[in-house]
Image (tube, rainbow, N blue to C red):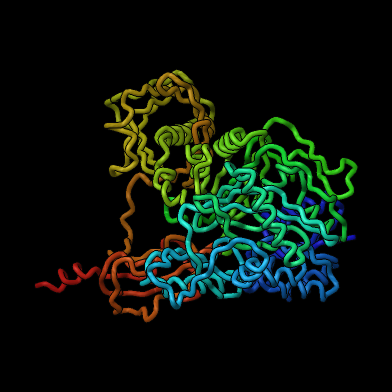
Amino acid sequence: MIESLLVANRGEIACRVFRTCRERGIATVAVHSDADAGALHVREADAAVRLPGAAPADTYLRGDLIVKAALAAGADAVHPGYGFLSENAEFARAVLDAGLVWVGPPPGAIEAMASKTRAKELMAAAGVPLLAPVDPATATGADLPLLLKAAAGGGGRGMRIVRELAVLDEELKAASAEAASAFGEGEVFAEPYVEHGRHVEVQILADAHGTVWALGTRDCSLQRRHQKVIEESPAPGLPDELRAVLREAAVAAARAVGYRGTGTVEFLLSPQGRPYFLEMNTRLQVEHPVTEEVFGLDLVALQLAVAEGAALPAEPPAAHGHAVEARLYAEDPAAGWAPQTGRLHALEVPGAGGEAPGDTSRLVPGAASGLVPVGPSAPRLRVDTGYAHGDTIGVHYDALLAKVIAWAPTRAEALRALRHALRRARVHGPGTNRELLVRSLGHPDVVDGRFDTGFYERHLDALTAPAPGERHAAVAAALADAAARATGDTLPARLGGWRNMAAPAQRKTYGEHEVRYRATRDGFVVEAVEAVEGKGGEGGEGGEEADEVRVVALSPYRVSLEIGGVVRHFDVRTYGDEVHVDSAGGAYRLIARPRFSETGHRPPPGSLLAPMPGTVVRLAAGLAEGARVTAGQPLIWLEAMKMEHRVTAPASGTLTALHAAPGRQVEVGALLAVVQDAQDAQEESSP
């Protein structure tokens, strides 16, 4: 029996495993980098061991240090989580060689599936349908588009879509570099890219006694940059015959490698419904909660039981209802999914519990219930996270803040419950993809189950358009600030609407909206809301001039406005110049602007500024001051939160300054280089 478990991971998955360990009476050990010294997973563990450094290559990818940590802390088992070393056969062997229990599949099974190229050969022999690989060295236009993938690891790292042969070599190098950084292995392969395909997978669970469960299907087609954003179980709209084919193929894949423990077999479905084997993830998946909620199982508890040698019943429990998971990322979808960093002030989802799996029974082999799931018929919510209020989100690791999961008897109810929960959540701190998630869950294509892996490519502009309620959120922020600056008490509710007043007004600017208001004996009166420099598009002239907006109640933290005859409430919290306004109609993160524009130093024209905090990982070949560059040419690569981001030339011209260097840490807005536009250079040289 396992008495003490070390989780060779961090963040949300470490917290998730620790939760089950507490329930089963197992002591817990965390490992942490210097950047994670105060992280939630460290605070929740019974003991913790430092891994010196911050970069993954120096910490969470150092299997030798992790094994030493387990022995030093007295752990007798290691759980790898997902990512990092979770699919590294050598690490699994090192754990076993040290006399520790490995909570995962046999090293041989990991090895067989670790390389996607070798896995495809194995699956072909087992009769599993798959896409034939393409040799990049001999690829022609007829082979396009191509999908480049890292042979090791997953999570979308090292993945590229190539639609032009001219950029194939460059993309191969970029994919290889990103894969090497994420997994320590730079092998990349190419295969045909299936347009408008769906990403469907099957959760498997196998014991050491010959039993293999196929726990339904999951649809993970809603992806950004080849990383999943929204997942659900069961996959919608599949005929029973196709579901059977997928389950049988998944079981065949597991048996072909003598699998044990949890794993996932991933497939790509063509628009015609033909399945192709993608890969087998020999670990627990990020999206495992939707399977737990539908089957009433605790997959981590089952992992531990199988590692202890327990036998599974011959058949898995029956599935009930539908579950949907949304990944809340600290990122800006409208700015190329740029990661966001900073202090997390609040993370609350009303009505959600943090226990897994939801409110159903914790069912493991040998339970008296016989693995019959018991759950309520009303929708339920669950949040899995590795952060708490006050924590800092840094640049070194994944941008995932939390996973919000909703279960309901039907898919429509689950989508609605999750959308409602995300809209009402309090997420204060760095910018997130929360609004994108809310809009995605209500999009007709998602609601009707008519989506594929290209969904965000087609709909991103609409899903990231400015929120229509931001104008009134700015009004609420300005009035809450005015209340705080007045007496600090709740002010009278007898206030007027939009008016043209002769007396001077106070002005406050939030985001793209300038709010003008004045104080009267009866309270505050709002005069107008205008777009800043033509932005925003809602206030002032041409906006909602006919709307009668009246302040009903006001305090520094809550503002009630009557808008067009309807009273709406806004909760306001201020953190420095960052203001968060939450309402039933949406949540808004606004930045308070200074009244007068700054007149300090401005970067010269053609400046390349860091779009996010991160590390410079490489420069374009031969890049140096004086080099000629062309518009759109990739010049500098930044890595932040385990993803690479390109900085391209804004125009054709000459590189007149270069401040970026590989290995340099930069903050958002840092000057990386300057490109002098060819036309500007010609004008300067003219007499």
Q: Position of residue 333 (x, y in %)?
A: 46, 51
Q: Nearer the viewer, residue 165 or 598?
A: 165
Q: Residue 91: which quarter of the image?
A: bottom right
Q: Position of residue 163 (x, y in %)?
A: 39, 64
Say whether residue 634 is left or right of residue 338: left
Say whether residue 126 is left or right of residue 521: right
Residue 431, visible in the rendered structure: no
Q: List the single residue furthest toward the bottom.
A: 622
Q: Nearer the viewer, residue 399 or 522?
A: 399
Q: Residue 686: which quarter of the image?
A: bottom left
Q: Residue 497: which quarter of the image?
A: top left
Q: Where, quadrant-wise, is the C terminus in this rendering? A: bottom left
Q: Nearer the viewer, residue 379 or 399?
A: 379
Q: Is residue 496 above or below residue 93?
A: above
Q: Position of residue 11 (x, y in %)?
A: 66, 57
Disc tally is 0
Q: Residue at 43% x, 34% y: name it.
A: 469
Q: Residue at 53% x, 67% y: name it.
A: 132
